[in-house]
Every structure is written in C-alpha cells, then in structure tokens.
Image (tube, coloured by chain):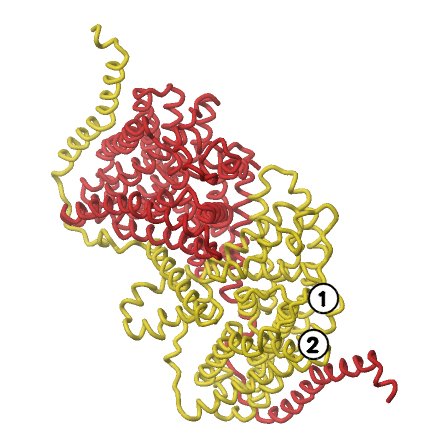
Chain colours: A yellow, B red
Amino acid sequence: MARLSSAPARRHLRFWSAATLALFLPVVSLGLIAAHTTGSRTAASDAAPPHEGMGAAGHFLLAAAAVLAAAHLGGVLVRRLGQPRVVGEICAGLLLGPSLLGRAAPDAAGWLFPERVLPMLDGLAQLGLALFVFGVGRELSGTRLRGAAGQALLISQASLLIPFAAGAAVAVALVDDHLGPGGRPLTFVLFIGCTLSVTAFPVLARILADLGITRTRTGQLGLYSAAVGDAGSWLLLAAILAASHGFGASRLLLDIALLVAVAVLFLGPLRLLLARWADRADGRRGAEVGTAVLLTVCVTASAALTAALGVHQLIGALLAGVAWPTRGRWAVAVAERLADTAKTVLLPFFFFGFGLTTDLGALAWGGEAALTFGCLLAVAVASKVLGPGLCARLTGMSWPSALALGVLLNARGLTELVVIQIGYQARIIDAEMASVLTLVALVTTAVTSPLLRLLGPGALDDRPLPRRPPPPGAGEDPGAPAKPAGSRHSADSVGTGA
Amino acid sequence: MARLSSAPARRHLRFWSAATLALFLPVVSLGLIAAHTTGSRTAASDAAPPHEGMGAAGHFLLAAAAVLAAAHLGGVLVRRLGQPRVVGEICAGLLLGPSLLGRAAPDAAGWLFPERVLPMLDGLAQLGLALFVFGVGRELSGTRLRGAAGQALLISQASLLIPFAAGAAVAVALVDDHLGPGGRPLTFVLFIGCTLSVTAFPVLARILADLGITRTRTGQLGLYSAAVGDAGSWLLLAAILAASHGFGASRLLLDIALLVAVAVLFLGPLRLLLARWADRADGRRGAEVGTAVLLTVCVTASAALTAALGVHQLIGALLAGVAWPTRGRWAVAVAERLADTAKTVLLPFFFFGFGLTTDLGALAWGGEAALTFGCLLAVAVASKVLGPGLCARLTGMSWPSALALGVLLNARGLTELVVIQIGYQARIIDAEMASVLTLVALVTTAVTSPLLRLLGPGALDDRPLPRRPPPPGAGEDPGAPAKPAGSRHSADSVGTGA
C-alpha cells in the first residue's frame, strides 16, 4: 500500500488503467460483438469493389499535381529557348492531351485525366484566369494615359479594324470552300475578320509579365489597346452571331448600352465605394478575411455580369481590377496575395488545360489547307503588326517601338481559339477552317518573342507612362515606382526569370 | 506649305492620317465586302441561340460568387451565435442546396448551380481543403509532443476504439432493421462502429482555427489525436470494406505497410531534402514561383498517394505539411500565403459544397427513426467525450481540460459524412440509417462550441506545448512563439474573429 501511494507508482497505475480503458476493453468487446454477429451471413454482395481507385477527389489531386509539374517543366524549358513560359505551358498541355499522349497511349491519358476530373481542373483554371486578369486591371488602374489616351484609342481601333477588314477580304475567297452548314456568306466573311481582329488579352498580359515589360510604355499601350480592342471584338462577335441567327439590332444595342453602363458604374461609384470601404477596413480587426472574400466575390460577380451581357467574362474581371482600391493596407496586401497565388498556382491550369482539351492531330492537312493557312497567317501577322504599328508611328512613336507594339498585339493565343470554337459550334465555319485558324492563333502567339528580339533591345519604349501621384499620407500605393513596397509588385520579371 | 511645316500642324496631319488608316479605310472596305457577299443566303440556321446564357465559365464564376458571398454571410451570422464559421458555411450550403432552395424554387436552384458547374466548384473545394490541411500539418510540425507523445497516442486510441466498440454494441440491436442489401451483419456492426469512431480532422482543425485555440495544449493534443485516430479509422474502414467484399487480409496488410513506408519517407528523407532545397532556394532569383509550384505539387501528389493506398487523401496533405521546411525565406512565405489563401477563399467552397450536394429533406422520419437517432447520438457523444476524456484525466489532465478535449474530438462533421456515403454506396447500410447517421454527424459538430462554452473558459489547457528550439541563426522559424514573425502565423483567431 505504501508503494502505491508514491507519485510515480500512482502515475503508472493511472497510465495502465487508461491503456486498459482505451485499448483492452474496446478490443475485447469488439471481439465479443463480432463473435455474436458472425453467425448469420447474407449472400456474397455485388457492390462496388473496396478500392475503387482513389475516388474523384484523389484522382483530381493526382491530375492537379501532374498538370502543375508538367506546366512548370514546360515553362522552364521554353524559357531556355527564349519563349515566354505560357507557350511552354500550352505545349505541355498539348503533349499530355489528346494530340500526343492520347494518341500514343490512350489508356494512360484516360487514367491520368479522366473525363470527370477535367471540369474540376477547369474550375481552378477559370478562377485563376479571372484573378490574374484582375491583377492586370490593377496594373492598368495605376497608370494614366493622360496625353496618350487619344493615341491608345486610335491604336486599339487600328488593331481591331484593320485586321478585321483584311481578314474579311481574304475570307471572300474562302467562302465557297469553307462555309459551315449553319452560316451565311456574310456572317462567314465577318466571322473570319473577327477571328483575325482578336488580341488575346490574357496571353498578352502574361507574355508582358513573363518578359518583365508590363511597366514599359509599349507594354502599357499594348495592354490598353488589347483591352479596348478585345471588348470591341466580343461586341462584333455578338453582333455577327445575332445577325447569323436573325436577331435584331435592338438587342445588340441594348447589350452595348448595358455594357457601357456597367463600365461607368465600375469606374465611378463602385470604385469610390470600394476606396471608402478600404479606408475603413484598415481600422477593423479581422478585416483580412472579409477583404479576401469581397475581392473574390467582386471579381467573379463582375466577370459573370459581363459574360451575361455577351462580352467575355475577362472584361468584367479587368473592370474589377481597375475599380479595386490602390490604397488601404488590407486591400493592397490581399489583392497582391491573391493575384500572385492565382498567377503562380492556378493560371497554369488554364493554359495547360487548353492543350489538354485540343486535338491538333485531328486536322486534315493537304496542299490547299496549307495554302489557306499560309495566306491567313500572312494576312493576320501583316495586318496586326503593320496596321497598329503604322498608327503608332504616325502618332509619334519611333519605328522600332511602333512595330514592337504591333508584334505584341499580334499575339492572338487563346482568345482567338475561344472565338473559333464559338463560330465552329454555331456552324459558321467548317472543321477544316477551324483547324487552320487554330494553328494561326498558336503560331501568331509563338512568334511574339522571336519577333520582339528581332526588333532589338531598343524597340521597347520603356519611358514610364505618367503615373497617378500617390494619395497624401498613403504609403502603400503599390504603383509608386520609387517605393520599395512597389518592387514586390513588379516581381513579375523576377518571379518568372528563373 | 509654311503652315504645314509647323510642328503642331504636322502632328495634326499625322493624327488624321492615322485615324483614316485605322477607322475610315477598314470600315469602307468592310462595307464593300459586305455588299459583295450579302447576295447569296443560305437557309436560316438551327444552330445554338447567340446568347446561350453566359457559357460554362461565366456560369461557374456566377456560382462561385454566390457560394463565397453566401458562405461568408453564413459564417458571419453564426459567429454572432457563438458558433464557428464553418457551421455557418455548411448551413448556407444546406439553405441554397436541394434541402431548401432546391425544394422551394427548383428552377432558381438549377439556374444558379447547374449540374455542369458543380464539379468545377468541387475542384476549388478539393484543392482548398488539401492546402488547408497542409497548413495544419505545418502547425503540427512546429510542436513537439516530447513528454506528451504517450499521452497523445493513448488518447487517440481511446478516441478511436471506445466509440468504435460502443457503436458496434448499439449496432447489434439495429442490424435486423437497417442492414443494407449488400452487407453482412458483421460488416454492418463494424461499419456503424467505424462511423462513430471518426473525428472530422479538417472540421476540428477549422473549429480550432475559428475559435483561435489551435496553439493551446488541448488544441494540439486534439489535433494529434484526431490525425492519428483518423488514419486508424480509414484503415478500419478499408478493412471492413475488404471483409465485406471477401478480400483477404494480405492486401490490407500490404496497404498498411505501404502507408507506414510513405509516412517514414515523408518525415525522414523527404523532410531533409526539402529543408536543404529551401536553404538553397533563398539565394536564387525567381525562386518564389518554383517554391509555390513545388509546394502545391507536393501537397496534391502526396494526397493522391495516400488516397491510392485507401487512406483518405487528407492524411497525405497533412504529411506534406509536417515535412515542409520551417525555415527558408521563400518556403515559409509561400506556405503562409498559399495556406492563407486556401483558408479564406477556397475552403468555403468545400464546406458550402457539402450542403449543396446533400438533401436533408429526403430523410423519412418516424418514431422509430427518432429513437434510433437519439440512441446513436447519445452513444456517439458519450463515448467520444467520456472515453478520451477519462483517458486524458488518468494521464494527468484536469477534468475540465480532459472533457474539453473529448468535446473537441466529438466533432465528426464531414469525415463521418463521407464515411456514411461510402457505406451506403457499398450497400452495407440502408437509406434510413444513412440519414440518421448524417444527422448525428451534423449535430455532434454543431454542439462542439456550446459544450466547450459550458465547460467554462478555464477548460482549455493553454499552456503551450514544448516547441522545437529555433535553428541557430534562422530568424524565420514561424513557430518561435516569442518572435513577432510568428504572430502572423497564428492570425487564425484574428482573421476569424470578425
């Protein structure tokens, strides 16, 4: 008894009682229960096997790991070749998609990326794209085009209309061979013009970020022109589709009026409201979570709004980025964190995903198709590089800078691919035309970097555009170029220079 | 001629030439082309309407905005009632899902959350969950259980085995009424025991974060016990399913051996490798992107690995978090950024999504079902609170702390719901049993906070567990409690205190 009352012995006893309680008793009762119920057996079941793979979630996570690893690898490899990362990500997707892996080893491709997993990956891609474009909008909102607004507008119109007219003119020769079963000659011609008029705004923004030239005058003018031009292209596409289906002009005008109203709402009242909110949020505890949620809701809701108006969802995300406050501790910190995360971790899903859902091998190639491809490619590059380039030259840029701007606007990338798919699904163009245009889009994107290098290092006009002066007392303006705080923000070039 | 040679006049002329080039010429040529091709018309097409809504992407973005806004609102509302945010997020999902909105206004529910959008939302949910659990693993890796390891192991076994035995005992009385068409009595009994033995590790981690008690001794012991216990529960479930389908023990043993090998690999060589990599990465330019990609690939790949071994994917994400380096500038900064983003922006999709895909209204309620529910609930709460509680008391905790630990482990939440669905799909239990167990899971989760409050503010043992000493010369150890750098890391409580 004396031994038991000593402290270590008592602790010992307690430990073993606990062990008995936790392990011995349950196991014994389980044994008894098992013995009691083992008697009666039903027939062998025909239910699903126990290890039915790893379930949708496990499979999705495996695919996500594969996508990110492959996209990163592709990006790093093409950087060595002097191409922007995004080209490598698209190529990695093409390699692991139906174009190559799906053809060489359909079982492996089907196992790695089963049907049910693709939409889950697409969810990441779409959110990443919206948040990335939001970040681009923030970049734009920090810059003023004062003194360059007329120039930017003119260049954007040149970038839209000249390739449009040139494409339509070429299309007249193609209409007999490639008109889709659901199209009329006029809609076909206008549609081809529309596809050539597109600049892939997200791809352009990504290329600028990859090359570290987002902040140059050329880069900023290119972004503005692409944003305005893209909005125009989507409106034109909506008009063409409406015409193709016999819709009246009234609906189109209504949509345009609504879009303008939305833009005014974002750049006016909403911007002020958000700025006031950001100022107030700084004083509140726990405003970080609220800010992150508000930002994401703003971006996704405005993207959905412009999508509902028939313009692309990215225009809405861009507007949200322009309207987002440029001061306020949480507003700036959270926006940077989300945009950074989206760019590094989510966005590769978008670019990789395109390759993953495209089958380049399905193209039927012949002499005639190659000729069509060559013509369209020549017209596309010439009209996009020379049209806006001439415009920029006439409004005061040097020739190399003007051409560099044209080269940037020539990157059609994914936006054209989306437009092509819409036209193909509306049966305005036939399958061969769709394949040819797909290749035009990919080539015009891939030649952007080599052409820029051809123009020489002096081509980029890197005088900074005049920036909005930082608001009094706000040290956090992420755009203030002299602040060390801003250096993080332009880490595009650093982050992707590896 | 004299006027024209003046600089402003020349600029004027150039501007108008540019305008002509950009606007006038293309529009005129488009007019000519249009006039040329308008002649022939094909029949009116029957293609898709021009505005086919906003496309999958637009719809997904709309749904994402709705989910985040509703989940945040629900979280803020239940915070006022003293419940953790996560309960509000689940409730918001139930309200907008088939349980309420789908019943009251099926058209609205179908429009807001169409079928094709649900997997896209699920992608965000799964990635967010994996990254969140990774963050929890990082929390765990900063703490040492030296002196408390035996205690934690004992408590985890008590938390697993006592409710298991109690549940199996109750199930003996239920087997005649609720045996599913594909089950045997033994598997039924063991399965019910298994569902009650579960602690929802992610829900527990989220509740701890929401209440700001992750860093207390009680919180840490609870996390450890839940992690170890959950791994055990999944192994048991795998064993039950294997037994139910006549699989041998060899496969199960193989899986267990593989799982142990994976755990050793993660906590040994991989951890060292990552630490060395993190040290090297600090010196490299552009290591940020690489770090973010490496982190996400690590998390998703290890999650997929454990899922493939038949254990839940979250165990893999947890292991990745424990193995992730705790020093190295980029390694720490990127991990915090990703875990924060996942918690605030992606994780609500998971908890909301559960409500969105569950139809509580489908339960068929009668007197007998209510009795079954009451019995199971009582057994579930009593065995989880008292079993580990008694164990903790016997190993040296005060009664209130020991009971608080039991209450924490009683939160079964989503893990039990997943287990129930697996058992229902394997037809071990019938539909009524599945409904009853679903409600048990929800109630045990919702009572966690009220019961904790009932135990009083002194119940939580908030003596910090002994922490690993910071490595010499490394100022960034996020766990070092005295460092201000660590305060950001435990911002859980601040972030969710709004």
Q: Decide which of A254, A40 is in the foreground and name it.
A: A254
Instruction: Give above or below for B285 relative to B7.
Output: above
- Give the structural element (helix, strand or loop) at label 2: loop
Number of residues whose C-alpha sits closer than 10 Å to that of mark 1, classed few (under 14), some (14–19) or many (20 or more) = some
Residue A461 falls in image quadrant = bottom right
Whether the residues at callouts 1 and 2 have beta carbons within 8 Å, the answer is no
Q: Decide which of A428, A313 is in the foreground and name it.
A: A313
Q: In the rendering, which numbered label is found on residue B427?
A: none
Q: Decide which of B373, A160 is in the foreground and name it.
A: A160
Residue B35 falls in image quadrant = bottom right
Q: In the rendering, which numbered label is found on residue A397?
A: 2
Q: Residue B166: image x %, image y %?
A: 26, 30
Question: In the rendered image, which quarter contains the N terminus of chain B?
Answer: bottom right
Question: In the rendered image, which quarter contains the C terminus of chain B?
Answer: top right
Say whether residue A1 is left or right of residue A353. Answer: left
Q: Earlier in the sequence, mark 1 or mark 2?
A: 1
- Could you give the CA–CA distance between mark 1 and mark 2, rounded to whole angstroms? 15 Å
* Name of the residue lying farthest toward the left: A39
Which residue lies at the image location 34% right of the left edge and 64% below the top edge?
Answer: A113
Where does label 1 land, which residue?
A145
Q: Residue A373: image x %, image y %?
A: 48, 87
> Is residue A31 at least partly visible in the picture?
yes
Q: Residue B91: image x %, image y %?
A: 48, 42
Amino acid bearing label 1: Leu
